Amino acid sequence: MPTYAEIMKLVGFKSKNAAYKLVNKLIEEGALSKDPSGHLIPNRLQDELPLLGLVEAGFPSLAEEQILDTFNFDDYLIKNKESTYILKVKGDSMIDAGIHEGDLVIAEKGREARVGDIVIAEVDGGWTMKYFKKMGSLVYLEPANKEYKPIFAKRELNIAAVVSGVIRKYR
């Protein structure tokens, strides 16, 4: 996000105070907020879209188009904006979990990993995304592809984030 001085120049204001007032109004309206260090961050990745109803993934059924509500992807996918980030997936080790190469995963730092969570982890100096697993007191990472073996750290295993969502674009 731009600084107050950059906003001042961008909008054509003569003073930083005018930019400050504009930013405060955008914060009041919910378009912006500040992270713990005071930097400006946008509150919405996407405006709300109409939620029309359900679609059958089994047998076809009659459906009427009716706006039931609105839907906001930020509200659905992101619990804590300051600790959430997006990563682009490379590789096929999580394909049986429905995560394909080129997908985007939403990961939340600081959340404690539970057995079965998909995590972003640093293992012996390298980074990967796998299922978090335990066998007694032994912690390991398990892929979602039979072609790959579980990963047991030789030196160090650090869980950096827990995956909370996947985004796939078909075209």
Image: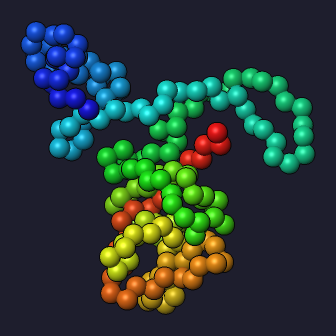
Q: Where is residue 123 in the image (x, y as percent from the top left)?
A: 38, 77
Identify the image quadrant of residue 144: bottom right
Residue located 54% across and 77% down the image: 142
Nearer to me, 15 or 26: 15
Can you see residue 165? no
Identify the image quadrant of residue 42: top left
Can you see residue 100? yes
In this picture, is 60 found above or below 100? above
Q: Which quarter of the rendering shows the C terminus?
A: top right
Q: Where is residue 49 in the image (x, y as percent from the top left)?
A: 58, 27
Identify the image quadrant of residue 137: bottom left
Q: Where is residue 155 in the image (x, y as percent from the top left)?
A: 33, 87
In this picture, is 160 found above or below 8? below
Residue located 52% across and 42% down the image: 76
Nearer to me, 20 or 66: 20
Q: Position of residue 163 (x, y in %)?
A: 48, 59
Question: How many circles with numbers are drawn on the protein?
Answer: 0
Q: Which quarter of the rendering shows the N terminus?
A: top left
In this picture, is 150 found above or below 132? below
